[in-house]
Image: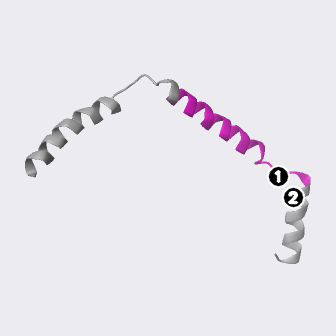
Amino acid sequence: MLRKTIIGIAVVLPLMGALAACDDPGPAEEAGEALDDAGESVKDAFKDDGPAEETGEDIDDATGN
């Protein structure tokens, strides 16, 4: 049992190190970054409050809600 665990660790650790050491982003990494950037752009587009939102907040403040 202990021998299998040690062998498993000896095999997995170098593989994990090799994967973590990749410097060049692949196509999946670049696509993920593009999706993240697009999501941030969409979020920023709805960030600013328009006049109706500001009026609604003023009404909420005035009525104590």
Secondary structure at badge 2 equals: helix
Residue 17 in which image quadrant: top left
Q: Nearer the viewer, residue 65 or 30?
A: 30
Q: Where is residue 7? Give x, y as percent.
A: 13, 41
Q: Where is residue 12? Give x, y as percent.
A: 23, 38
Membership of 18 in magenta stretch: no
Residue 20 in which image quadrant: top left
Left or right of residue 37, residue 50 in this image? right
Question: Residue lying farthest bottom?
Answer: 64
The residue segment tinted magenta is 29-51
Residue 62 higher or lower than 25, as above or below: below
Membership of 47 in magenta stretch: yes
- Amino acid identity at mark 1: Asp
Asked if disc 2 and disc 1 are in contact, CB closer than 8 Å, the reply is yes
| x 88%, y 76%: residue | 63
Residue at the disc numbered 1: 49
Residue at the disc numbered 2: 54
Residue 58 higher or lower than 4, as above or below: below
Mark toward the start of the polypeptide (2 vs 1): 1
Q: Nearer the viewer, residue 1 or 13?
A: 1
- Amino acid identity at mark 2: Glu
Q: Nearer the viewer, residue 7 or 19?
A: 7
Near mark 1 (Cα within 10 A), the count class, few <14, some 14-19 or many ≥20, is few
Question: Residue lying farthest left?
Answer: 3
